[in-house]
Amino acid sequence: MSTGFAIRRVAAGEVDALVEPLAEVLLDCVEGGASVSFMWPLPRERALSFWRGVAAGVRSGERLLLVGEAEPGRIDGTVQLVLAQPDNQPHRADLAKMLVHRRARRRGLARSLLDAAEQAARDEGKTVLVLDTVTGGDAERLYQRSGWQRVGVIPNYALMPDGRPCPTTYFHKPL
């Protein structure tokens, strides 16, 4: 399925230049109600600080960052792989912060990002991926349809951006 989005891996040398547009995607997702570690209202500087930290992880090789763009230079979605793991887990990576701007939803971008992240993990020699997501949300359904195996649910694990508690579902996928 062609989604009209180009998915690409962000190089260490370009990551700092993408902090602003990545912050825009994060701000949009949190304003739209996504439980992705932040509360609303999310100060712009807090979003920028988060992405500066991710950029440092990309530069150090601890993280891999993918972006999806409908047109060059406009980031519509992103996902990360946390590559740095404990010594006894070199085969594993965490899928983190799958974010799709509301303007780009329901067009296959999340699935394309997920497929690209799984391939990038294989390319990095990873054989197991893990993630957590809000129970009952669109992302949970995407992961199930994409062959991820549900591990379990933790009630009241996190808060929605408006302060309501929500359960989280953990998944894993052997590659």
Image: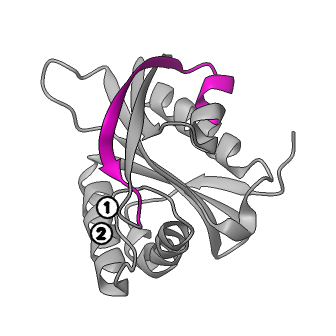
The secondary element bearing badge 1 is classed as: helix
Nearest to the observer: residue 117 or residue 150: 150
> Are the residues flagged by discs 2 and 1 in contact, CB closer than 8 Å?
yes
Quadrant assignment, res 138: top right
Judge whether 146 appears above or below 61 on screen: above
Q: Amino acid at mark 1?
A: Val
**Residue 143, how many percent across, how many down?**
59, 30
Nearest to the observer: residue 36 or residue 124: 36
Report the span colored magenta.
142-161
The tag on residue 50 is 2
**Residue 111, how many percent across, how many down?**
68, 40
Task: Specify the quadrant that holds the N terminus.
Answer: top right
Report the residue at 55% width, 21% height from top.
Answer: 148
Judge whether 66 appears above or below 53 on screen: above
* Residue position marked by numbered label 1 in the rendering: 54
The tag on residue 86 is none
Is residue 126 a member of the stretch shown in magenta?
Answer: no
